[in-house]
Image (cartoon, helix red, strand yellow):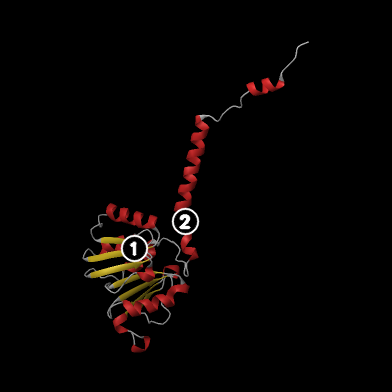
Amino acid sequence: MEIINESSSSAAVKKPGMSAGGKLLIGVTGGIGIGLSVVCASFVAPAFRKFCLPYVPATTEQIQNVLQFLPKNASGKLLDIGSGDGRIVVAAAKHVRSLKTDGVELNPWLVYYSRLAALRDGVSTQSRFFRRDLWKFSIKDYNYVVIFGVEQMMLDLEHKLIAECSHNAKIIACRFPLPHLQPERTIEDGVNTVWFYDLSKQSQAAGC
């Protein structure tokens, strides 16, 4: 009678190991997952702030409406608050070559993209992009300030503009107007409406 030693047979059978290709696939998938998490965090994080300034690219019509308030002989410095992918900053630099144009944006990936866009369009020496919190960024040296804000932040932003901007600064608001300041001009264009403010012409009652 043949006697089978099951314990010996079981020990002799080895479980197949994971192939090198499988390990590579897991490693690549994990790396992509981590990379996507890091990138997405830059876009999701603002939602946890007091005011969420979402990334919504400016339309061609909005850009053209903004540029109407920038005379060809304008000088000094322009700041785009929440500059996103930098298209307003780049367009303003190309429109008025004598104007220094800056953007402030919290999302690092959009800042990197904006710098590349400025380099691509030949205005990298004329434009700068800062990765900063707009509430902590000084705006006192700017002659023109462009705002693509959300309704909930416009009152606090109006207070910051009045407190920090020079008395003759020009403000260009898109999507939502400033709640108390009176615009000098308005381009009515639906969602592309733009309001133009001249702080030198605001009443003392407004605190300017």
Residue type pointed to by label 2 = Ala
User: What is the number of the mark on residue 41?
Assistant: 2
Give the SS element for disc 1.
helix
- CA distance for labels 1 and 2: 24 Å
Name of the residue lying farthest toward the right:
1
Image location (x, y in percent) of residue 187: 38, 73
Q: Which residue is denoted by mark 1 in the rendering?
A: 88
Query: Could you say which is closer to the camera, residue 23 or residue 6?
Result: 6
Up/down of 206 relative to 89, above or below: below
In the picture as drawn, the residue positioned furthest to the top comes out as 1
Residue 130 image position (x, y, % from top left)? 32, 62
Q: Earlier in the sequence, mark 1 or mark 2?
A: 2
Image quarter in which the N terminus is found: top right
- Residue 56 appears in which quarter of the rendering? bottom left
Q: Residue at (31%, 53%) from the top-left corner?
A: 116
Q: Amino acid at mark 1?
A: Ile
Mark in front: 1 vs 2: 2
| Relative side of 162 to 154, left or right | left
Relative to 43, residue 194 above or below:
below
Please, is residue 3 above or below residue 37 in the view?
Answer: above
The secondary structure type at the circle numbered 2 is helix
Numbered circles on residues, count:
2
